[in-house]
Image (spheres, rainbow, N blue to C red):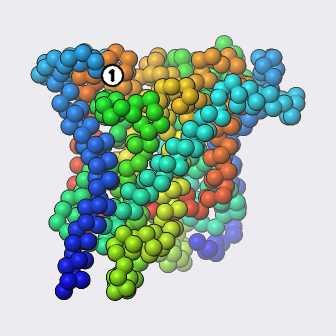
Amino acid sequence: MKQLRRYSMQRTLTICGFLALPLILLLVFTYLPFVDMVGYSFYRWDGYSDKVFTGLENYKTLFSEPQYFSAFKSSIYYFIGSLVQIVIALYFANVFFYKLRGKNFFKGVLFFPYLLNGVAIGFVFLYFFKPDGVLDSILTALGVAEENLPLWLGDAALVNWSLTFVSVWRYMGQNMVMFCGATQSISGELFEAAQIDGAGRWQQFFYIMLPNIRGIISLNLILAVKGAISVYEIPFIMTKGTGGSMTFVIKTLSTAFTDKKIGLSCAMGVILLLIVMVITFVQKRFVEGKEEQ
Amino acid sequence: MELREEKNWKFYVSNILRYGILIAASLIIIAPMLVVLIGAFKTNEELLTTGPLTLPENWGNFDNFIKAWTKGRMATGFMNTAIILVVSLAATILTGTMTAYVLNRFQFRGRRLIKALFLIASLIPSITMQMSIFQIIVGLGVYNTRLATIILFAGTDIISIYIFLQFLEGIPYTLDEAAIVDGASFPRIFTTIIIPLLKPAIVTVIIIKGIGFYNEFYTPYLYMKDKSLQVISTSLYAFQGPYGTQWEVICAACIITMLPTLIIFLLLQKHIYSGLTMGAVKG
């Protein structure tokens, strides 16, 4: 009896002791910043002097000055890019499902960019896209006249496509590996039966593969939307958001750390989080709801 | 999948097409990095006079690597990255395994709430809250110290917790009971039984998180402005100003940064794939 009580006491101590550090870190660096951010969004504040309560002023500024929301425009390019990326990833996941010479090599090459340092990727593609750079040299070698070569990163009509290409280059492999993982769990018998019935690979893909990995595809679609509205690293490193490549997150960060408008920037953060929450809700409600019993 | 297919002309055509696409895609991935490698071996004059696709005259020219390494203070970068990596990984493994152990082995009030708190946290992109995290970091007095980044990396996340939970379910509770009968305390069970058996999961989490920490740019960029605190990402980023025209040095610096990733990938390919899919299933 005595021993049991000792253990129940120890049990409580263990639970509290073990959870203390993880929970403190979680609360201080995720939930407290969230609460703070919502709070600051009602103030005018440069981060140093006294905060001035301004109510909904920051939100009014956001909705009345188009320079803030227009930064969402670039998200459309990244979203289109992610759709293309998902299709490419599905194609390769399907190719890797079957016997293939050099499978590990090809899979490794296509996946590798996902592991690379973002700053290095940024420089690799600055070198790639710069005037007289790699892409221009390739195109000149193919016979394109030099005066017809555009400024890949300097032309406002092109810069987002160029940056989206970098994003697809970087992330396609991740989608592919996730799809590959999902295809592993489909029973091989289904495919054998289909083959006996004379179904080709395209038919197998559309009637067996796709329906069986629907869940992970919708998950990736949702992640694509979330990713597209919160893009920042590659454009931040490559163009700093100049020349039409501004994204909402870069704008949020520069409003806080360059313009020193913490309150306004927090209001932008709140708006972004609201959008993310809505997307997540849609995902939980419509995508996962169907999968789980 | 090893299925036999009929080998008619259609089979051969589609095979050629398939390999053609695979080779083309691989070229698109490799070429941008390969030209950077080529550029890294050129002299400044060579780089300005020859096209980026022209091979360097001297493949033994390591001057740019030396220059990048010394002038770009990349040694400092690697040092700081290594320190942050080791301490943060130890911390995140500790917080992750402790959380998962308690969630898996004990039934208590608030258990579901704690899991939900970690789950909801994973839905919030932390980049959108840097404005207020910044104030907290400054308030704690760790701004411009390595601790700023370490403290932000030290916590655990729902994906790590799921990976640990998945492994914990496979560790029979009878092992714990036997140890309790022998008079072992819970922390002792955790350190002597659970941790050793969780090793494969720990390795997976270390690889996935380690790659993420190595690549992290914005956190060290924002919280460690001091030059002596540069990590590999920020020391590479610093090349863009003063070396803006010396592409051969930047190329060398990129290769130096990417090389460890390539080595890790070649050594741990299987772990990386499985870790990624494991995390993705629930995440």
Residue A76 position in % (x across, y down): 38, 32
> How packed is label 1: few (under 14 Cα within 10 Å), some, or many (20 or more)?
many
Provide the chain ID for the residue under circle 1.
Answer: A
Residue A203 position in % (x across, y down): 49, 64
The residue type indicated by label 1 comes to Ala
Quarter of the image with the N terminus of chain B in it: bottom right
Residue A162 position in % (x across, y down): 53, 28
Quarter occupied by residue B256? top right
Q: Nearer the viewer, residue B57 or B186?
A: B186
Q: Nearer the viewer, residue A11 or A75?
A: A11
Q: Residue furthest front?
A: A2
Residue drawn at point x = 35 percent, y = 82 percent = B183
Residue drawn at point x = 51 percent, y = 61 percent = B204
Residue drawn at point x = 49 percent, y = 71 percent = B196
In the depicted structure, whether residue B31 falls above or below residue B98:
above
Q: Tell me: A138 left or right of A89.
A: right
In the depicted structure, whether residue B68 falls above or below residue A13:
above
Q: Which residue is mark 1?
A: A256
Question: How many labels sit on residues?
Answer: 1
